[in-house]
Amino acid sequence: MRIKAKEIATELGVSPATVSLVLNNRPGVNQETRKRILAYVHKKETELWSESPLAFKGRIMVLYYIKNGTVLDHMERRQTENPTQQGSGKSPLFQAMTAFCNKKGYEMVYRIFREDSEAPDLLLEECRRLHIRGIYILAAEMHHSDIYPLQQLKIPLVTGDNLFYEEGIDSLLIDNREGIARGVSYLVDKGHSHIVYLAETIDIFNFSERREAFLSEMARRELGDASNRIWHLGCQTEEVYTAMQQRLNAGIHNTTAFVLESSVISMGVCKALKERRLRIPRDISLLGFDALLPGNLLGTELTIIKGTHTKRHLAGVQHLIRHIEDENEEILKIYYHTRLLEGDSVFDKTKYIYRPCF
């Protein structure tokens, strides 16, 4: 229930651009002006809520915690291609979150916290100033120690894409282990045994789980020691492309299938394969994990293991509100199963004689 930036600017005698910077937590505004604008917004919004037929119960925060920026970079890249993707304040996901919060009498505040340029103490001060009653954290990049400052607030915390169960914090996650097992099983059923996992060079929670699951599943299938079958290529598309070119120059020997850890890996690898004019799936099979940019890669519909995002994050906000309203609410660790969306990027070796061209 925010008032318009233009109205705030007129009332306080500042420019609409200054108000916009403050409301979107951007740099370029001195602290005194920033505090004056936030205090005014807090006062006016509280007044508006008090006049509403629905009693104002307080604010909750959806916090995007950025340590290295890779997850946010991926999200912003998707938004450039498709503005309705999650993460945008105008996306269906955030509209659903906002609508649910409003229905329950809460205002939702969306906040990006960048660890490399912001101090946790200032975030805590902001939460206290805004009287935040609970936080849902998109926590894929967080380390365990990063959660401790937020626990000082003594308010309910719920996390997505990371596990803090031992700290007494609810966690809602993609079942990465089940997803990788599903993907490896699919490739094996199609006759592939020499499978290589192509990874990024950062160790966020989801990626680490997927790599561990790959090693475990390959061992369970008695497909040999796979410790040398995880290739770390990079965390930017061009970096991945260059590293993959080097791998192709060295030769990939008997490898018939790649598991692609992320959309960045998928795009960089496919660019390198296209340049070499390798046929997908005739020369090499590909299986991706999670969402990709719109459109096909190399004219091929990529087979992917897909996790749920929209339902999981909305459920996180819903559970957060239950925690706020009932301090005895159970602490949960919830894994969401994946789905295999079959494209045409995996060659069925059980039906045809397979002769790779390299």
Image: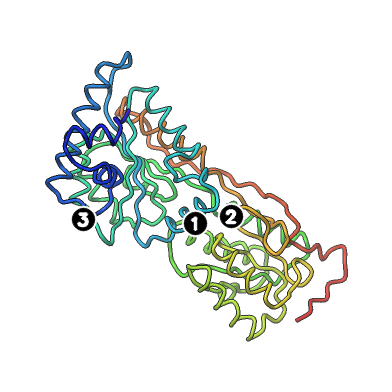
Secondary structure type for disc 1 = helix
Query: As shown in the figure, which amino acid type bears the numbered disc 1?
Result: Arg
Circle 3: residue type: Ala
In the rendering, at what x and y percent does residue 84 appear?
52, 43
Q: Residues within 10 Å of mark 2 (few under 14, many from 20)?
A: some
Q: CA distance from mark 1 to mark 2?
A: 8 Å
In the displayed structure, 131 sits above or below 308; it is above
Q: Is residue 154 left or right of residue 221?
A: left
- What's the distance in space between the residues labelled 1 and 3, CA to CA? 26 Å
Contact (Cβ within 8 Å) of mark 1 with mark 2: yes
Name which of mark 3 and mark 2 comes first in the sequence.
3
Q: Residue at horizontal 48%, vertical 38%?
A: 93
Identify the residue under disc 3.
Answer: 119
Q: Nearer the viewer, residue 253 or 236?
A: 236
Checking the image for residue 210, the label placed there is: none
Disc 2, SS: loop
Amino acid at dot 2: Leu
Asked whether the residues under the numbered discs 1 and 3 touch, taking CB atoms below 8 Å apart as contact, a structural biologist would say no
Q: Is residue 185 left or right of residue 230?
A: right
Q: Which quadrant would residue 102 be assigned to in this image?
A: top left
N-terminal of the pair, mark 1 or mark 3, is 1
Identify the image quadrant of the N terminus: top left
Q: Residue furthest right?
A: 352
On the image, which quarter does residue 101 sit in? top left
| Label 1: few (<14), some (14–19) or many (≥20) C-alpha neighbours in 10 Å | some
**Residue carrying label 1:** 77
